[in-house]
Image (tube, rainbow, N blue to C red):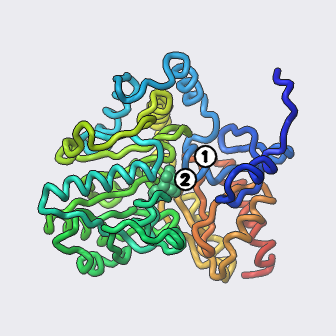
Amino acid sequence: MSTEKTEDAAALCADYQMDTYARTATLVRGKGSRVFAENGMQYLDFTSGISVVNLGHAHPAIVDAIKAQAEQIVHTSNLFYNEPVGRLARKLSEIGLGGKCFFANSGAEANEAMFKLARLWGSANGGRYEIVSMVNSFHGRTLATLSATGQSKVQKGFDPLMPGFAFATFNDLESVKAAVTDKTAAILLECVQGEGGCVPASEEFVKGVRALCDEKGVLMLCDEIQCGLGRTGSMWAFERYGVKPDAFTTAKSLGGGLPLGALVASPALSGVFTPGSHGSTFGGNPVACAASLALFKVYEEEKIVEHAAEYGELFRKGLEAFAEKYDQVLGVRGAGLLLGLVLKEPDAAKVQEELRMGGLLVCVAGPHVVRFLPPLNMSEDDLEEALEMVGDALAVVYGEDEE
Ligand SMILES: Cc1ncc(COP(=O)(O)O)c(C=O)c1O
């Protein structure tokens, strides 16, 4: 047993980590839908680590896969082949676009790879380089991905932004048409915007974007980093619209909790990168890939995507009751288990804090939206307990008697 003195994590992080996050509790352990804090408090975790632990914390199949692979080999570098890496690439091809993938370590890096792919394709197809992205989108925090993000708060102070991105209005096809020029290489969208406020695209919009891409000969790119992997009740959010993009990105839960991202391409785009075009030291780490294979096995065995669709409807109905009860709750937005409670006033942080004190961890998506990202394998008890806690928190913030 370690004889090391227990240290104050919050103080250490405050003193030695840059001040980029607003943090609250110090978590020491997680099991299923619950996390346990150092002060003895336990929480129902409806953040899932911002949609990273879709099967809950410490899922035995993922823990076993990580242990087994760590005992074999932790890292090979991409100078060598490794079986879990190849098996995961095949899996992503089978459930993706039937082509090849590139592995990265995070969502932003997967998007960087997708932007580079679009530019390389565009340079060989008429010198096109521009990517049309959507207002209110979120694509990451690196320089290219924040330049592609349609939110000025993410971009502020980082000028000059990377050139080559144009913006259109989400769910407004005419505005996308107006943004496309002879320099456009691709149109980029999240089929359900997560950080932008849990906003689903309309069917007309997604189908219209696909048709526009076909007509103009440009690529359709989807960012599935938050809305993919079953989160919205289908494996990929684009499937809800009956369309296929030319390439998409996935990350967050892909590594079962370990850092892993991927750019997944159609067969037509699978040969655009050649040796030397792109690379990553850690991308496709064998332990993360083994964890990912275990995650997909559980998805199949336990019909996780179907469960997310079913529980998404149940949870939405439960949340909608609060919109009927409170004038200050305007409604529920999102899809599957990516749901936002939309508030009239900018009270999301206040409700979030009240929920935390009552034992439920949630995210926000802007000042007006309380965002719920529960584990996709949540139980009926989790659902009922969470709804009760939401009711309690709203009663504190808005009063009991509202009708
Ligand atoms: C839609 C979307 N794209 C990209 C990212 C960036 O992913 P990462 O934080 O892993 O770089 C996020 C993160 O929240 C996201 O929600």
| Above or below, comparing residue 274 to residue 337 in the picture | above
The answer to which of 210 and 105 lies nearer the viewer is: 105
Disc 1 is placed on an element classified as loop
Which callout, 1 or 2, points at the residue further toward the start of the chain?
Answer: 2
The location of residue 390, given as percent across then percent down, is 71, 64
Image point 63% across, 45% down: which residue? 379
Count numbered badges in the picture: 2
Location of mark 1 (residue): 378
The location of residue 70, given as percent across then percent down, is 54, 22
Tell me if I can see residue 95 in this picture. Answer: no
In which quarter of the view is residue 97 placed? top left
Would residue 42 appear left or right of 251 to someone viewing this image?
Answer: right
Q: Amino acid at mark 2?
A: Tyr
Residue 311 — which label?
Answer: 2
Disc 2 is placed on an element classified as helix
Image point 69% across, 51% down: which residue? 17
Dot 1: few (<14), some (14–19), or many (≥20) neighbours within 10 Å?
many
The answer to which of 60 and 222 lies nearer the viewer is: 222
Image point 49% across, 65% down: which residue? 334
